[in-house]
Image (spheres, helix red, strand yellow):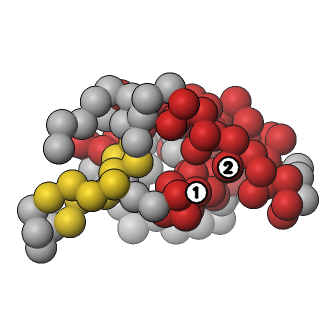
Amino acid sequence: VTLTSLDIIAGRGKFANEWPGNRMLRRQIKKRMNEYHNSTIPTKTEIARTIVKEVVQDGGKFWKYLGTQQAWKEMTEKGAHDRVTQAFRTPKMTCAQKRALYPNAQAKTPLKK
């Protein structure tokens, strides 16, 4: 399997975070964040489906790494949908945004100012 810059890869860490396709996905998520969070469940489902369709129409695929097999496997449509909806639920926040959202939280390690 040869990953392209249009592909979305499931995973955590620097490799997945900096992958060009994942950056593109985060931009799409950011553009639709307010619409998604102010929508009904059926509309949220349709927004996520639309994003999956756009990635595929542009030539991208959704992949996950199977560590036991040391191979990439293309995600199912449901897996891709789940990946997109998870991205809507867990946006990347700066330390300042976290402090504003959770002013009384005690950090395990000091947050950057």
Amino acid at circle 2: Ala
> In front: 23, or 82?
82
Looking at the image, the residue that sits furthest to the bottom is: 68
**Residue 81, label in figure:** 1
- Kindly indicate the quadrant of the structure image that contains residue 69: bottom left
Q: Is residue 62 left or right of residue 55?
A: left
Q: Is residue 5 left or right of residue 78?
A: left
How far is the residue under mark 1 from the one under mark 2? 6 Å
**Are there few (<14), some (14-19), or many (20+) residues within 10 Å of tag 1?**
many
Q: Residue at x 18, y 37 (%)?
A: 2
SS label for mark 1: helix
Q: Is 65 situated above or below 93? A: below
Q: Are marks 1 and 2 in contact (CB under 8 Å)?
A: yes
Residue 42, percent from left and from top = 85, 61
Give the mark, 1 or 2, whose residue is nearer the N terminus. Answer: 2
SS label for mark 2: helix
> Disc 2 designates what residue?
48
Q: Residue at x 61, y 40 (%)?
A: 53
Q: Is residue 90 left or right of residue 68?
A: right
Amino acid at circle 1: His
Residue 86, percent from left and from top = 57, 59
